Amino acid sequence: MTKAFQPRPYQDLIINHEIDILRCNVWAGMGMGKTVATLTTLEDLFMAGAETQPALVLAPLRVAASTWPDEAVTQATSAAS
């Protein structure tokens, strides 16, 4: 069973920034939770009735091809639990 995502304080800053400024950049180091914070933002906006598609994410090829799909599945699984 996957544990529900609990954002760290700095991830709350990312989420709030992305909600406040819809076209923004997130400059944070590797492993800081940018992907899961952004997926959380998109889910929160979607649940609030905002238009969330399409969403443009610029990332290195490996991150775009592997990390994003893996995190999306993980987050969807934890949300369903």
Image (cartoon, grey):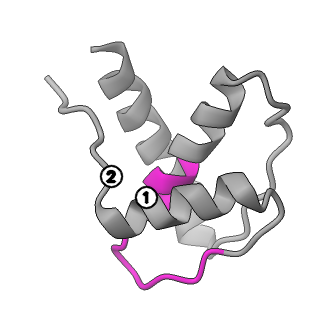
Amino acid at circle 1: Asp
Direction from residue 71 to residue 22 in the image, left or right: right
State the residue at coordinates (43%, 58%). 12
* Quarter of the rendering containing residue 25: bottom right
Query: Nearest the camera: 43 or 2?
Result: 43
Label 2 neighbour load within 10 Å: few <14, some 14-19, many 20+: some
Asked which quadrant contains residue 11, the reply is: bottom left
- Evaluate whether residue 40 shows in this view: yes
> In the rendered structure, does residue 32 fall within the stretch colored magenta?
yes
Residue 69's place in the image compared with 48, above or below, is below
Quadrant where the C terminus lies? top left
Q: Which mark is residue 12?
A: 1
Q: Residue at point 77% right, 21% down?
A: 49
Left or right placement of residue 58 versus residue 39 in this view = right
Q: Is residue 66 visible?
A: no
Distance in Å between CA atoms under marks 2 and 1 = 6 Å
The correct choice, above or below, for 81 with respect to 45 in the image is above
User: Element at badge 2?
Assistant: loop
The type of residue carrying mark 2 is Pro
Q: Which residues are magenta?
A: 26-39
Any mark on residue 55, and which?
none
Residue 44: percent from the left, percent from the top?
59, 34
Q: Is residue 56 left or right of residue 76?
A: right
Residue drawn at point x = 33 percent, y = 74 percent: 31
Q: Which residue is mark 2?
A: 7
Q: Are marks 2 and 1 in contact (CB under 8 Å)?
A: yes
User: Would residue 29 be counted in the magenta stretch?
Assistant: yes
Q: Position of residue 28 (x, y in %)?
A: 49, 82
Q: Position of residue 40 (x, y in %)?
A: 51, 42
Quadrant in which the N terminus is drawn: top left
